[in-house]
Image (cartoon, helix red, strand yellow):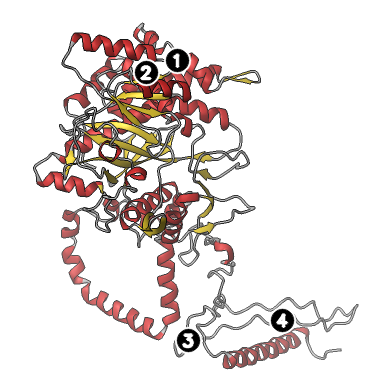
Amino acid sequence: MLRGSPERELAAWWEAEAVAATKAQAAKEQVRVDPGAAGEPERKAGEEQPKEPAPAPPCAAEEGDARIPPRPPPTLPVSLAKPEPASGLCPHGKSRIKGRSCKRSSGQPDEYCSLRPVTVDSSKARTSLDALKISIRQLKWKEFPFGRRLPCDIYWHGVSFHDNDIFSGQVNKFPGMTEMVRKITLSRAVRIMQNLFPEEYNFYPRSWILPDEFQLFVAQVRMVKDGDPSWKPTFIVKPDSGCQGDGIYLIKDPSDIRLSGTLQSRPAVVQEYICKPLLIDKLKFDIRLYVLLKSLEPLEIYIAKDGLSRFCTEPYQEPNPKNLHHIFMHLTNYSLNVHSGNFVHSDSTSTGSKRTFSSILYRLSSKGVDIKKIWSDIISLVIKTVIALTPELKVFYQSDIPAGRPGPTCFQILGFDILLMKNLKPILLEVNANPSMRIEHEQELSPGVFENVPSLVDEEVKVAVIRDTLRLMDPLKKKRESHFPDIYMDRKHRFPPVSERMSSLKLQLSKLSIVRSQLLGKSLASKENPPHSDLASTSQGNANPDAHLPSICLKQVFPKYAKQFNYLRLVDRMANLFIRFLGIKGTMKLGPTGFRTFIRDVPAGLRGGLLLPGPEEVQDAAAPRAGGLADRPV
């Protein structure tokens, strides 16, 4: 039994335990070689060292002895500092493994804890894989080249949306997009809009669908020729399922024997050929522009600020019976001209058979051409084309990913092929659901022997498009903005107006000496404490992951200009009604085929008074024709 009063004995025990804890901590500090190696900043001279909590004392009182009360666990003095966390822990002791973030007790994010990286499944990227890898590496995201058992944030497919086992995340393809931009379907969609708004949709050549409209094609050509005997048109025939220029040819008359062969083999579209294109270096060329369809509902459209210009490899002449078969003169398809002996591979963006669109605009601008007007017309063309495609796309989407059921959200990069006429009017040639994202080209080393060579022109344009598409679709962007509001805050809010800054100039000057002394002290402290400064710089890099990236090359054009084009969305309203009332009828779905039947008589119904635009919409519709987008450059 212990002698004396319980209070005196307890005080003696506390004193002995405090001495033991101090000796243990001193021994531990002597063993430590690098105080900052474990993530703990080195302390200044004279600063009190933290003490380890004393272990709970063993119970010394025998059972039934009431003279000594139970000993409570010792309480550390308030003046003792809390030990800093070891490496791999945030300042609050939580693990930083797996990139998880930590918040203070106040709910604010800790600057030393970073968000997890965005995950991308690239197992089905195919030909776009190289550009995708570069983009993911620049963004410092996490790639899964062979797929992942756990869900990814983004799934990148090379061909089409065909996975029904993806229930979350984002997919870079829309259901039905491949079918929607095929030549026949695109022509039908644009024709509906041409019947409703003929002046607004005059950027698409007059087209006929073969074999269904062959007799109509013959009759209309004959009627125009009878009215104007001097009219000698040329027509271009494009197979519906063709790609890369396969199966395309020119004819001068509907009685051409090749046309009869097309009628028996496969469906096609025949269009009036543009005989007077704009020429550069006496060569015909077209423009491949990349358009991001970010969302269908609400509709969001972005256009890349740069694209590719693909040149023919034979000097252009207007079509005549002798040169109709000269594909290197009339067809701008890269996959065809690359096999021409005159094709020029160049690492320069302004020379060769493939150049950047910006280099063409610069050349035209040097000749006094209004570049803003060209961009204005191209923006209008893109928006109107997407408006023509979205009604049926919504039905496809509702059929594959019904509302209220698990599934991914979708986005897609489209390739618009545009031809500039001699009068600089843009003409839509076609839309590609799977534009080539290869950043290399084939070069023939010897007859029949080819080698893939990097293409700097392709890499400059396509990597930027993919990278910035991912940035716009970043699922963690809002979380970063909420974690680091000072960095993602709009510039006009981060920096006060010049007048306010000038008014506080005297106050800032008066504090200059204090600031200098503080900066000098921080500088000396950082030299004495390099591990801490490295950690701070790392946290800043995590806080602003886009600091090392250039500005986004994709410019939003819708809904930015929605007010000027909403009057064109009549068929889109029909699609919304169809989905709401007829899209699901019991267990039977009325999909895209049912929708086409539903809108077969849309032009007549709309002209008869169904869903006609109101007075305000008509007034807004006049605005783009009067001023347009010419005063809003891309």
Q: Which residue is drawn at the image coordinates 73% and 76% (left, top)?
A: 72
Give above or below for 289 relative to 404: below
Query: Which residue in the protein does label 3 denote?
Result: 47
**What is the secondary structure assignment of the residue under circle 4?**
loop
Query: Which residue in the protein does label 2 denote?
Result: 192
**What is the secondary structure assignment of the residue under circle 1?**
loop
| Residue 512, percent from left and from top | 21, 73
| Residue 250, percent from left and from top | 31, 28
At label 4, counting other C-alpha atoms closer than 10 Å, the crowd grade (few under 14, some 14-19, many 20 or more) is few
Real-space Cα distance between discs 4 and 2? 83 Å
Q: Residue furthest top?
A: 608
User: Residue 291 vs residue 475: left or right?
Assistant: left
Q: Is residue 613 visible?
A: no
Q: Which mark is residue 599?
A: 1
The C terminus - image quarter: top left
Q: Which residue is drawn at the image coordinates 29% and 51% (left, top)?
A: 493
Judging depth in this view, the residue of 95 and 383 nearest the camera is 383
Which marked residue is nearer to the observer: mark 4 or mark 1?
A: 1
- Sequence order check: which comes first, mark 3 or mark 4? 3
| Residue 573, percent from left and from top | 42, 20
Real-space Cα distance between discs 3 and 2? 80 Å
- Sequence order check: which comes first, mark 3 or mark 2? 3
- Sequence order check: which comes first, mark 1 or mark 2? 2
Does the residue at mark 1 contact the one at mark 2 (Cβ under 8 Å)? yes
Q: Amino acid at mark 3?
A: Glu
- Sequence order check: which comes first, mark 4 or mark 1? 4
User: Residue 252 vs residue 81: left or right?
Assistant: left
Q: Amino acid at mark 4?
A: Pro
- Sequence order check: which comes first, mark 3 or mark 1? 3
Does the residue at mark 4 contact the one at mark 1 (Cβ under 8 Å)? no
Which marked residue is nearer to the observer: mark 3 or mark 2?
A: 2
